[in-house]
Amino acid sequence: MAAAAAAALAAADSPPAMPQAAGAGGPTARRDFYWLRSFLAGGIAGCCAKTTVAPLDRVKVLLQAHNHHYKHLGVFSTLRAVPQKEGYLGLYKGNGAMMIRIFPYGAIQFMAFEHYKMLITTKLGISGHVHRLMAGSMAGVSFFTFGTLKSVGLSYAPTLLGRPSSDNPNVLVLKTHINLLCGGVAGAIAQTISYPFDVTRRRMQLGTVLPEFEKCLTMRETMKYVYGHHGIRKGLYRGLSLNYIRCIPSQAVAFTTYELMKQFFHLN
């Protein structure tokens, strides 16, 4: 059982084998179809993830813009108030335009991770946690965390946590509820690590409207100022709890949908 699990895990991390072409298209046509399927899988995953948290994004925009209907309310009271004033579709206002932006973004991000992982394995001969770290750092901080959780889970508890892929029985994939859990944990860890940099970036972007004594020119100066005047909890990590509410389900849905789409489009 251990040997079979190891073989299946190795197959899951190895680049997908290209099917032999039949007919005039040849290998190039098959390869093009592979990248098209991969593009669609990533795009669909991104759209599903963004749609999941669309109501929270709408509330965030309303509160940030100090909308006169909702400016006196908090996050959860606004979530209740919007359907009363605008109907339930009001929580998804603008989501169609968001899909146009997020589809290519999600597609390229997921494709980039798979491509970098394959490239690092085939060209540099590096595999395991190292190649996931390198590929994940180039494509997005949560890819490494999710890939590591998936790898460790399938290595130590393949029967409990995994199942054969529907498009390739030789490849082990996580069960759906485990996928959701790993995706949520990956999103939470990635957000926790990167959040101080996000706070710093946003503060620098708002530099023109800040008082003169609060303006900082460099990232280091800005981070030092925020930490010195507001500390860690109320400064560098201010608003993290709301970000968790948005990020954890979003990442859970993104990774789970992508894993399902990989099977649907025969990418394993």
Image (spheres, rainbow, N blue to C red):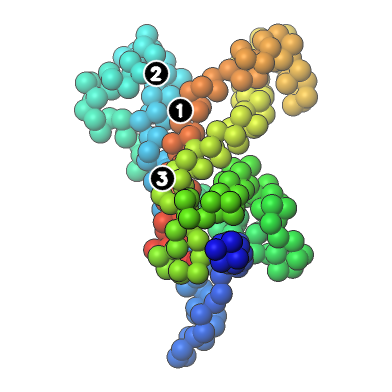
Write the residue at 69% across / 52% down: 129
Q: In this view, does 65 lie above or below 161?
A: above
Q: What amino acid does circle 1 point to?
A: Ile
Which x, y percent locates residue 59? Answer: 38, 24
Q: What amino acid does circle 2 point to?
A: Val
In this rendering, would 252 be left or right of 154?
Answer: left
Residue 265 seen in the current view: no
What element does badge 1 sit on?
helix
Which dot marks residue 177? 3
In this rendering, would 153 be left or right of 200?
Answer: left
Q: Check whether the beta carbons of the residues at disc 2 and disc 1 lie within 8 A of each other.
A: yes
**From the viewer's perspective, is the residue at label 2 or at label 1 nearer?**
1
Q: Name the residue under label 2.
A: 75
Which x, y percent locates residue 265? Answer: 42, 66
Q: Earlier in the sequence, mark 1 or mark 3?
A: 3
Label 2 environment density (alpha carbons within 10 Å; few <14, some 14–19, many ≥20): some
What element does badge 2 sit on?
helix
Q: Mark 1 points at which residue?
A: 245
**From the viewer's perspective, is the residue at label 2 or at label 3 nearer?**
3
Which x, y percent locates residue 82? Answer: 28, 22
Residue 228 seen in the current view: yes
Extreme residue toward the front, this view: 1
Write the residue at 53% across / 37% down: 185
Label 3 environment density (alpha carbons within 10 Å; few <14, some 14–19, many ≥20): few
Q: In this view, does 122 lie above or below 196?
A: below
In this rendering, would 92 be left or right of 202?
Answer: left
Position of the N terminus by quadrant: bottom right
Instruction: Pick the residue in front: 265 or 94.
Output: 265
